[in-house]
Each structure stands twice: as structure tokens, then as C-alpha cells.
Image (cartoon, rainbow, N blue to C red):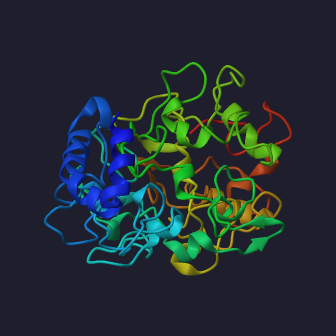
Amino acid sequence: MIFAVLATESRTWGWNNILRRITPALVACCALVAACPALAQTFSDHFDPVTGVNRIVDPLYPTGSCGQCHDLHELDTGGTPSARLLFSENSNNLCYTTSGVGPCHQLMPANYPATESSRIPDGFPDAGYFEHNAGGVKIHGVDVRSRWTGQALYDNPAMVLGHYISPHANDPDMPRIDSSGKGMCVNCHTPHDSSNPFDQLLSAYRGTGGFDEPTYPTRYQACFDCHSAFGPPGMDPASRLIQDFYDSSINNDGYAGHQIRKNPAIAISWPSHIQVGDKLGCYNCHNAHGSQGYNGLGANAYLISDQRPEWENLTDPLNDAAQNRKFCFGCHIPSDGIPGSKTVDGIVMNALPAKNPHQASNTKACGGCHGDSYSSSTQNNVHHPAGKGN
């Protein structure tokens, strides 16, 4: 009924006048959605009335309101808005906009990359997740989202050994691709409401855990939505096996998902939120948005993150023994190193057992003993390592 009325009135008054007449109601509806957990599923940074989207100054569209992105008054376009009444084309450029008083997600945040100090601390919900905070309380702002690389690194089209440095932007097999040919932000994120409390992700991506799940840890579902048998058809076969490597019903040997075993030969102490059988979150090693290497010293392949000093120029860690060792020693301490000199999610690491391959000067690839095969669901590799647990 309402659409029939609008269609009739559009011929009389024009869409511009109609939008001006219905804008207050639309704004009220948006406020209702933002405030109602049943509809908004609780979480939306964009809707926050204090720290949400603040691109334009208009009394009709306060901070966090729909009109910050949807051009209900034609303030941006001066005419017909884009699809979905957006102020610009519905592409990644919408997220990168620098127009208005509060630019969005174009630049690399000031605190990139996230480090151990960026994690939610022990004793708070989702401890271990990378979220800029003060004493467990989130600090808001696009300039402190320390896991975002910025547009330039995300869009980087460079390849090494046949692999994109930033595959989620450049791989043609991404589920949704925008008009510029880039994998869209909305493949993983929603601009509206999310059931996940962090980063407006479409699926769960939570703090460290998984000890109580008999198969794979659903708290890392945001990655397993694609890195599983349900991934895009053109995905590399090895990338479709990651969920299986984390699945204890497939690999019931105590090592699936790089499990934490509380082995004193590997670590000295563990925070209270870590349980025996927890599986490492993907964010401990990877950043889905690309890489420039630690301190910008050279991009890593395979979406290895930039958060550890050893992690730069890791372009072939599977086949290059020196790179393989640099990657592993980003977290683990050589047998002749200093116990307690590294922490991972509050775990104080010990020096590795006194074996020749564990010495800093040795040249043998860690994968030579702990696995480096991705040929089937039960093979050993860094996601399902052979040997002592950590």
C-alpha cells in the first residue's frame, strides 16, 4: 500500500520532496533499529550516537544515524542518490571516503600494527582478541583500529611466487567484487548490525578458546566461512582445508588448531583465560587486510601479520628454511634464548627444549619435524603441528 502511494505521489511532487517529507520517520526507524537488540543483534559501532559515523553535520542526521551514509536529503548528491540511497557508489570507496568532517577508513590507523599490548586483557570477556582498549574497555575511533592496514596496503596488487600479498582484495575468486575489481569489505563485514561484538564482522571472531568444542572452534567462524569446504569454488585447495586442520573430530591427536597443552617445556605460565585444548585464533599469525612487514621492512605473503619483529619479508615460509624459522621464532624462543622473553596472548613462553634444531644458529626448517604438508585434511603443518603441544 505504502509503495503504491509513494509511486503516485512521486509523479505529483517528485522524489526529492517525498524524501524530505518522510525523512523524520526514516530517522526514527533507524534509531529504533539501532536501539533494539532483537533487530540490531546488539552490536554496531556505526550506529553509536557518540562515537559512530560522523561524516556530515546536519541536525536531522546526528552522529551514528542512517543519514550519515544514506543520502535521504540529497545533501551530498544534489540530485538522485546512488543505489540504496547511498551518498556514493556502493563500492569499497564508500568505506574509504574522506569527504565530510569525519573521514572513514582510508588511512592506516596511528597504532598499526596491533601488538601484544593491544589484546583484551585476562579477566575480561573475549580475552586475547586484538581490540584497542584501556583496562579491557574499548577505545573507539577509526584512527585506533589497529588491525586495519589502510586502503593502500589492502588494495596492493603485488604478487610473489604466484600469490597476492593482499588476496582478499585482489583474488578474482572473492565472493563479491566491486566496480574497481577489488574484493569488497562486505565479504566479511557489515555496515549495519552484527551478532559479533568486534569489527562488525558477519560471523563470529572472538577471544581465545575452543577447548570445549568437539570439532572446530566456532568462535573463529569468520575465517572458516571461507577457509573450509564451503569456500569460494576457485580457492586454493590448501586454503579450503584450514577448518579441517582445526577439527578435533578429524585430527583427534591433541594438536588440531595448534592446540595449547600447557606444556612447561614450551611455556612458563598461562593466564586464567587459557584452557588446555584451546586453539590458536587465526589473528595470532594472520591479518586479513594485507601486509607491509614489521616496521614496513617488506611485505609478508600468506597474510602473515606485521605484529612481530621477526615477521618481515616472509614471502615463502613453507619452502624457505630461514623464513620458516623466522616465522616460528616470532612466538617461540630458541633453546639457547632467554626464557620468558616472549609472550603470546599472556602466555609467557619458555625456551624450547635443548635439541640442536631448536638452537638459534641451526638452519633446519621447523616444518621438517613439525609438518609442512597441506595435501589432505590430516596432514601436519603449522595449523596442526606434529610434536609436543605448547
Q: Residue furthest left?
A: 59
Task: Return the x and y of residue 192 as percentages of the image width and height.
Answer: 37, 48
Q: Residue furthest right?
A: 375
Q: Quadrant of residue 361?
A: bottom right
Image height check: is 89 above or below 212? below
Q: How many marks?
A: 0
Task: Return the x and y of residue 215 as percentages of the image width and height.
Answer: 61, 22
Describe residue 266's horizontal placement relative to residue 116 as left or right: right
Image height check: is 45 above or below 237? below
Describe residue 134's horizontal placement relative to residue 238 as left or right: left
Q: Can residue 308 be seen in the rendering of this structure?
A: no
Relative depth, front residue between 111 and 368: 111
Q: Residue furthest front?
A: 12
Task: Return the x and y of residue 100 as percentages of the image width and height.
Answer: 30, 77
Q: Quadrant of residue 95?
A: bottom left
| Residue located 53% across and 70% down the image | 309
| Residue located 64% across and 78% down the image | 298
Describe residue 298's horizontal placement relative to residue 269 as left or right: right
Image quadrant for the N terminus?
top left
Image quadrant for the C terminus?
top right
